Amino acid sequence: MKALITFEGIEGCGKTTQIRMAGEYLGNQKIPYIITEEPGGSPLGKKIREILLNQEPYLIGARAELLLFSAARAQHVEEVILPALQAGKLVLCDRFSDATLAYQGFGRALNIDFIKTLNDFSSPSLKPDLTLLFDLPVKIGLSRARDRITRVRNSPREDRFENEELAFHRQVREGYLSLVKEEPERFRVIDASQDIATIHREVCRYLASFIRR
Ligand code: Z5A
């Protein structure tokens, strides 16, 4: 079965934890799948990820940021996602085009219609078939994300976004919730303030019902 399933949400919402557990669930069901991420799912994307997420001693304006995320997506779609779909696999993707609308559109206040056009350009005729949105209050998400950054000392800090104001993260959360209103049939909203095992059971229920359909 081929489909693109995206995992979205604000920082620290637990999507990365859940995407790994979802992969194990699919593996147990003998369903072929890959797990990938944005930015970073291709070699070019990894380079762009370093530029975008680490605190560097130079400026990255909102427009340049948008174009870099889009460049990473264009390469990722061509090099990783489309070949996996063509091979009949389920693609589980940690963030995709909705992240650009939520962060650069709602968070950075760039033009939403332009971002939609750019999303269509970087991932031609490819839309997620199902999107799981892990929703939780911004303060809880940020405190989880910051705990993780201080604990994981040997990898790059990737804290450029975590250092944004609370108001920025609130706009991103509101942005995601308004995307749900636009396309309620594609999104499933999960209360990400619950414990990991409870959330995993909910994810499995949504995956099972999607696969049955
Ligand atoms: N970005 C953008 O602006 N535009 C775009 O188009 C795209 C991305 C594609 C990197 O994304 C940044 O890029 C992101 C938006 C921007 N902003 N930031 N930062 P990312 O997805 O790579 O990075 P992230 O958002 O920080 O996600 P993450 O680091 O992978 O965290 P997560 O997926 O939200 O959560 P986690 O790693 O699974 O969990 C975080 C911690 O909480 C960890 O210690 C867990 O053990 C813990 N955790 C997880 N679940 C729970 C529960 N249920 N209870 C308690 N603790 C939990």
Image (spheres, helix red, strand yellow):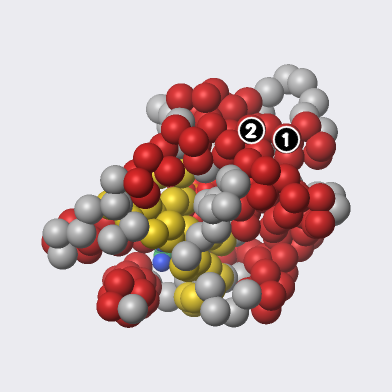
x%, y% of residue 13? Answer: 51, 61
* Secondary element type, mark 2: helix
Q: Quadrant of residue 25?
A: bottom left
Circle 1: residue type: Leu
Circle 2: residue type: Ala
- Tell me if residue 207 comes above or below residue 46 in the rendering: below
The residue sitting at 75% across, 50% down in the picture is 117
Q: Is residue 46 left or right of residue 197?
A: right
Please say whether residue 20 is visible from this viewpoint: no
The residue sitting at 52% across, 24% down in the picture is 44
- Tell me if residue 99 comes above or below residue 123 in the rendering: below
Q: Which residue is mark 2?
A: 71
Q: Which mark is residue 48?
A: none
| Mark 1 C-beta closer than 8 Å to ligand 1 | no
Please say whether residue 2 is visible from this viewpoint: yes
The residue sitting at 46% across, 25% down in the picture is 43
Q: Quadrant of residue 140?
A: bottom right
User: Quadrant location of the C terminus?
Assistant: bottom left
* Secondary element type, mark 1: helix
| Mark 2 C-beta closer than 8 Å to ligand 1 | no
Q: Is residue 165 left or right of residue 99?
A: right
Q: Which residue is mark 1?
A: 67
User: Quadrant location of the N terminus?
Assistant: bottom left
x%, y% of residue 184? Answer: 59, 79
Q: Is residue 180 left or right of residue 17?
A: right
CA distance for labels 1 and 2:
6 Å
x%, y% of residue 79? Answer: 44, 33
Q: Residues within 10 Å of mark 1 (few under 14, many from 20)?
A: some
Q: Nearer the viewer, residue 149 or 190?
A: 190
